[in-house]
Image (tube, grey):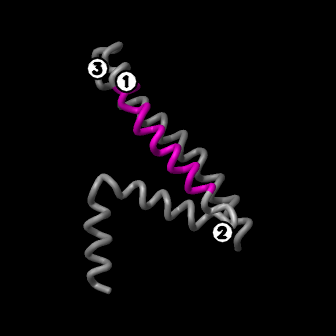
Amino acid sequence: LIWLWVGALTFGLTSRSWNAVGMLAVLHLSPATVAGKATGRVLFGFLLGLTVGPRIFGELIDRTGSYDSMWIFSIVLAIFAMAVLIPWVQSSNDENP
């Protein structure tokens, strides 16, 4: 059991941990009958972000000549993600007491 915790902590310190945490959340919050579709949609969103994100990042920096715009854009996206996530989690908890 100790090696499981060591592995989990080591994996959690890498840049790949967001994918595992996101998938675990989807599996935890989704009914078993739609878990496959739900994880597929989330993975699509993750990969779309990895595909489009660097292009947007580069364009903002090239157009503004500063990294400030990218920081602001990232903060706005994080706030938007939380605004979507919180009601979703609350509605999921209401359905599964």
- The amino acid beneath tag 3 is Ser
Q: Which mark is residue 69?
A: 1
| Residue located at (43% from left, 30% from top) | 73
Q: Are marks 2 and 1 in contact (CB under 8 Å)?
A: no
Q: CA distance from mark 2 to mark 1?
A: 41 Å
- The amino acid beneath tag 2 is Ala
Percent x, y of residue 9: 29, 69
Q: Dot 3 corresponds to which residue?
A: 66
Q: Residues within 10 Å of mark 2 (few under 14, many from 20)?
A: few
| Residue located at (37% from left, 24% from top) | 69
The answer to whether residue 2 is above or below residue 76 is below
Residue mark closest to the camera, 3 vs 2: 2
Q: Main secondary structure of the magenta part?
A: helix
Residue mark closest to the camera, 2 vs 1: 2
Q: Which mark is residue 49?
A: none
Q: CA distance from mark 3 to mark 1?
A: 7 Å
Q: CA distance from mark 3 to mark 2?
A: 46 Å
Instruction: Judge whether residue 91 is colored magenta.
Output: no
The part of the chain drawn in magenta is 37-57
Q: Residues within 10 Å of mark 1 (few under 14, many from 20)?
A: some
- Name which quarter of the figure residue 8 lies in: bottom left
- The amino acid beneath tag 1 is Ser
Quadrant containing the N terminus is bottom left
Which one is in front, 50 or 25?
50
Q: Which mark is residue 32?
A: 2
Q: Are marks 3 and 1 in contact (CB under 8 Å)?
A: yes
